[in-house]
Structure formats: C-alpha cells, structure tokens
Image (cartoon, coloured by chain):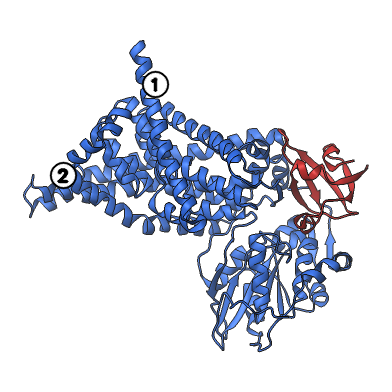
Chain colours: A blue, B red
Amino acid sequence: MDCHNKSPEVEVGKDTLKFLLMGNPNVGKSVVFSKLTGVEVLAANYTGTTVGYTKGKVRDLKQDGILIDVPGTYGLEATSEAEEVAVNFVKEGADAIICVLDATNLERNLNFALQLKKFDIPMIFVLNLVDVAEQQGVIIDAQALEEELEAPVIPTIAVRNVGLRDLLSAMGNVEKRQKEVCYTAEKELVEEEETRWKEIGRIVEKVQTLEEREPSLTEKLGYASMQPWPGIPLAILVLALVLGFVVGGGKAIRGALLLPFVYNIYEPAMTAFIGGFITEGTVVYNVLVGDYGVLIKIIEWPFALVLPYITLFYIALSTLEDSGYLPRIGVLMDGALRKIGVQGGSIVPFIMGYGCAIPAILGSKAATTHKERVIVASLVSLAVPCTAQTAAFFVLLGDESPWMLVGVYGLSILAMILGGAVLNRMLPGKVDPMLLEIPNLLKPDVKTVLQKIKIRVKHYLVEAQIPMALGILFAAIIAETGLIHGISDFLSPVVTGWLGLPGEAGLALMLGIVRRELAVLPLLDMNLSSLQIFTGATVALFYLPCLSVLAILIKEFKLKTGLAIAATTLIGAFLIGGVINQTVRFISGIL
Amino acid sequence: MSLYAIEKEHRCIIENLPQLGLLKSLGLREGINVAIKSKQPMGGPVIVQVGRRCVAIARDIAQEIQVREVN
C-alpha cells in the first residue's frame, strides 16, 4: 500500500532536520514555536489559533533544523480540517516529533501522545504549563514519565522561557533519518482505544500526584464566569470596560497629544516648508498641503486619528485572548447565537473582527462546517466595523453625540441578527452543535501580550499605510483638480438624491473600497447635518469590506462566494442608508 | 437518563454516548465520572467537568448521552 502518493507539503534540504511540533489544541505550541524560531506567530489561550501551519528555522541549534507548527488536534482520526493537516504531516514523516503536553490535563494529552508514538518517529515530549499545574496542586514526575514514554520529557514554562534550553539540547541529539514512515494507523487506533485508556490510567497513576488545594482566585473567577449568573453581567461589565478604555483612552491621547501636534506643529511647519518652493494656490500646492493635502492627511488620518484606538483595542484584545476569557463569552452566548446559525465558539472570530476582518475570516476555519464558516465570514464582512473604521466612527459620531455611536452599533448588531437568521435559512447544510473545551483562566504574561500588541500594531503600520497613502493621494488629486465635481454629478442620484449627502461624499464611497476607515474620514470636513452624519456612517458600516478583505474572501471561498458577499454588502449599505435618510426626512416633513 | 437532565453540581457516570470522535478526544467515554458545572439558558450548552477540565456540550449532544446519576 502506498501512502506517499502526495508530494510532501514542506520540502527540506538533505542535511536539514525536520521537526514537527504537535499536541492537543491550546497547550502552548505556538508559543514554543515562536520562541524556538523567532518567527512571529499570534498565539492565544483558546482552541484553534493555528489553523494552517507555519514553519521556521530553529535558532541556536547545532545542525540546520526546520520546525513546523502543526495545528493542534485531539486525535489522529482526521475528523476536521485541522486534524487532516496534522495527520498528513505525520504520514509525510519527520526526523523527530516534538509533542507538547499540557501538565494541567495530562490524561487527555497522553491519549494523543500514545497515538503519535505508534508512528515510528523519534519523539521529544515538552511538559508545558508546569507552573499552572503546580498552582492547581498537580505535581508530575517528569523522570518517571520519561521512563514510561521511552523518550525525553522536558518540563517547561514556555511563555517565560523556562526549560527551552533543555529542549534545544534534546533537539540537538536528533539524527537525520533515511527511513520513510508508512503507517496507516486509523483503524488500529480505533481498535486499540480501550487498551490505550487503560494504559493512560496506569501511567497517570504512576507519575502524577494531586494535592488538595483551596481553589485560587483565578480558578474561582473562571468558574463564576461560566455561570449565567454572575457570568452574563460580568461579560457586559468586561465589554463596557474595554469600550471605555478604548474610546476614552483614544480620545484622550488624540485630543491631548496627537491632534495638537498635527495642527499646531506639523501642519504649519509642512505648509511653510512647501510654501517655500511651490506657489500657494496652485494645484500642486493644494494637492500637497491644501484641504485634502496629502502630506497633511497622511499623518493626520492614520496616525493622529486611528493609531491611538488601534493600539488600545489590541491591548484589550490581546489581554483577553491570553486570559482564556473569550470562549467563556461564547458559552454564555451559544443559546442566542444558534438562532443566527452560529455556535458559541464562533464568538471569537466575531470579536477578532472588531480588530480586523482578515484574521477573523481566517479564524473562522475553526468552525466545523462550511455553512457556519460562510455565515461568520459574511456577517463579519457586512456588519462588524474593524478598529480603524471604529476609530473613524468615534471621531465622526462621538464628537457629534455619543447616542449616534450607540445607534450605529445597534444597527450593526441588528444587521448581524437579521443577516444571520436569513443566511441560516438560505444556506444549505447544517451547523454543528457546540462541543468546546474551556481553557483555564490564566493571568496573561505581560511580555507575551506586549509582543502580540507589537506584532499587530506593526502590521497596521506596515500593511495599511500603502493603500492608505495611495487612497489619500487619489483623494487629494480628485478633490483639488476639480475632477470631484464631475464624479459628484455622476453619483448624485444615489449620493444626493437617495442618501441625502452632499455630492462630494461620493469621494468617501470611492475611497471606502480601498480601506474601511476611508469611507468615513472624508466626511469629517464636510460640515454635515446630524442626519447626514448618521446616514454616512451607516453606509460606511455596511459598505464593501476593504480590498485586502475582498482578496481573502475570494481566496478562502472562491470567486463566486467572495463576490456574492461583496455585492450583498454594497446593496445592503445603500439600501439601509437610504431607508434611514428617506424615513427621517419623511417623518420630519410630516411633523 | 440523559446528561442534560442532570442538575447543576450533581455527578454522574456516562453509560452510553454517541459515536463522535471529538467527544472521546475530549476525554468523555463510557464509565467515567463527570460533574455538571453549569447549564446555560436559551437551550444553550451544559458545562461538564471531565477530569480537571471543563467542556461545554450543546444540548443536542448532551441529550443523547446516557448517564447514571451518582451522589
């Protein structure tokens, strides 16, 4: 029987060692991976952060070595997309498997470890989270476990670098293998199940000692947070605190620090500098430093208006992710979410969507059915504003009236409920019932959280700036050359007639294709009425996701579904925005 | 009786459960002793403690898991 009919996903050189990093979901594989390779990957304290795989070169190893971060799986029976990826990697073979075990949950982790051992590949076991286990009164004798597993067992606290040196030296002892692995284990694995659990029971009995401990404060909090009472009020409190932190903090930083800098120092200096060699009033001068001056807006919009909110949001999101709190919200919301065709676990991609839709859409891979994935991706694209757009809303609406902000977000939630209910009916297939492991509630490690925030803010600074700059340049040229009047006339039946916005708001719609916040920011300087602001914000909210999101949608769901999602958002935006405008005008006409 | 019928903070032994790979992988199998930690409103899941870890199980699945109450 041939199990090598597929060419391996990762080819390594003749003398390069190939290591697979494997284990149950949420045992810290991604943390170990980024510590060993220096490759920046985002880890979090819940199941399914790694859905594809990442590879990287191992640093500080005697030989050349490639480490592959395989998605976490509970078994090797290929019941989900992630498990299939994992099984394929094992079948391709490797020089060694590094299997990460969660010390707080040894039994279930051993179930996976013993299955892996069936494949004739040398193994190194990493016993991670020993600190948390100890706090819970679980003591594991690593040496005894080593004897049982007949392979090195290295106790670690990966987030704090404890034990990683020992792991590297164990990896240094691995030799390049010539032998190919060929093992069709699925059938045997199922048959052996009974004996395997007996074996696990025997090993655990031998290596693990439990001490009765008074539950710690975090354990008590972890328990309370999954009870409807006080869990639901607690969740509302947490979300309110996050919102207060981001909105209040962002406004303070922007108002006290960044805007004075832009308006009082940067803008006058830049204007004077450009005025030095370009005559004031010419088109070039206006494109550079006029009303839509590219040199002004390129600092004002992304850095002074958006960056503070992005940073604060990611501080909150990264902390929540690493605490293990988010899946608890999913459990509390599951009953309600099922009505819109989504199970509780998918709350995580939704929350991530408030940061950026791209990781949310990629994260929706953890959903077990295609139908659920499409629903999550559609709703995130339609109605979840990303942080950059949220920041723009805070500036546009928050300065007008906080109630408008509440109104727009209320509309967003309403659209998700209605949209989900409709998609749930329309799309064929089913949504699996919830079956989710709830992670330990942990105190996030400050260094790890800071690292995540750094990766994400850097991503915004690097990835967002080029489309942003091009968009702003485009806007400046259109606005300052008078082209805008032609475009306004062309779009006026929709923009002015139906939506009740000034003709130049067409600019926001054009720029909104590039980035979501650009559908909002141009409205700032247009002296709009309250109704116009609200309509403009509504259109922007439901409007097309940005170009990068569109690309991801097409890549993940094929062209047809991607374009269908895009078309729905476009039609939805004009429909809802127009209905609001027309209704308010009609009612105020009567009164 | 079904797992869904067990009250909060009560314990039971699993006697029979549907053939779902993930259930077994999460440590739920015949003969093990579990405790109900919480029941969610609106037809939401039950939270069951298996060993040292909690697992949320949707009502549909919990109703199909046959258990014997022990207290």
Front position in the image: A257 or A449: A449
Q: Is residue A500 visible?
A: no
Under mark 2, the amino acid is Glu
- Against B30, is A33 above or below? below
Q: Quadrant of residue A73?
A: bottom right
Q: Chain of mark 1?
A: A
SS assignment at label 2: helix
Q: Residue A167, located in which quarter of the rendered image?
A: bottom right
Q: Is residue A31 above or below residue B69?
A: below
**Disc 1 on helix, strand or loop?**
helix
Residue A480: mark: 2
Label 2 or label 1, whichever comes before in sequence order = 2
Q: Residue at x 85, y 55 (%)?
A: B29
Query: Residue drawn 32% across and 29% down?
Result: A498
> Residue A268 or A528: which is nearer the viewer?
A528
Identity of the residue drawn at 30% across and 46% down: A511
Q: Disc 2, disc 1: CB below 8 Å?
A: no
Viewer-closest of A253 and A238: A238
Q: Mark on residue A583? A: 1
Q: What is the three-letter code of the residue carrying label 1?
A: Thr
Where is residue B37 shown, x and y percent of the image?
79, 42
Neighbours of disc 2 within 10 Å: few (<14), some (14-19), many (20+): many
